Amino acid sequence: MRTRLLLGLALLSTGLLAGAFGYGAANLVPTFNAVPLDIRLSFHTELMKMNGITMQAAMGVSIVSSLTLAAVAHGRTRLLAGGAGLLALTSLLVTRFGNVPINSRIKEWAHGSAPADHTEVLRHWETFNDIRTATAVAAFALLVFASLRTPARA
């Protein structure tokens, strides 16, 4: 029963994480690129205020629940859950060391002006966003696969 509850929590949290990053990649980033730069910078800054809490919570619960599941599960479920936990951790690390420093720069630009190389910096942000989205989706996929393999009595 404990294993199934952990699997459910890991599925829910990684699904929310993958969905949020997926929505951002599919909808927010193209919208960022379609509007004038000053609007993008203002909206991006405000969005990051909200995301700071919700996305960190989703990443944290995804990591902890997946790695805890890996610690209590056996066989292939252990491997899949461990992989999912490491992928969720990768999403966190890419966010922390890739996107967040650029978000700080974007916040400065929103209150002043963007530097000449802003297009390249924003392209780096989008690359980091694509990486964290892919790792979050992969983490969710591993847990879906684990849930399909886990017998109802587990």
Image (cartoon, rainbow, N blue to C red):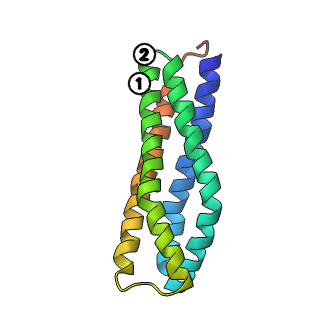
Q: Toward the viewer: 18 or 116? A: 116
The residue at which mark 2 appears reads as 75
Verify CB contact (< 8 Å) between mark 2 and mark 1: yes
Q: Position of residue 130 (x, y in %)?
A: 41, 58
Relative height, residue 121 to residue 133 (above, below)? below
Residue 129 in sight from this viewpoint: yes
- Name the kind of residue labelled 2 in the image: Gly
Q: Toward the viewer: 125 or 14? A: 125
The image quadrant of residue 99 is bottom left
Q: Secondary structure at mark 1?
A: helix
Neighbor class of circle 2 (other Cα within 10 Å; few <14, some 14-19, many 20+) is few
Residue 40 in sight from this viewpoint: no
Q: Residue at x 61, y 12 (%)?
A: 153
The residue at which mark 1 appears reads as 79
- Name the kind of residue labelled 1 in the image: Leu
Q: Residue at x 42, y 53 (%)?
A: 94
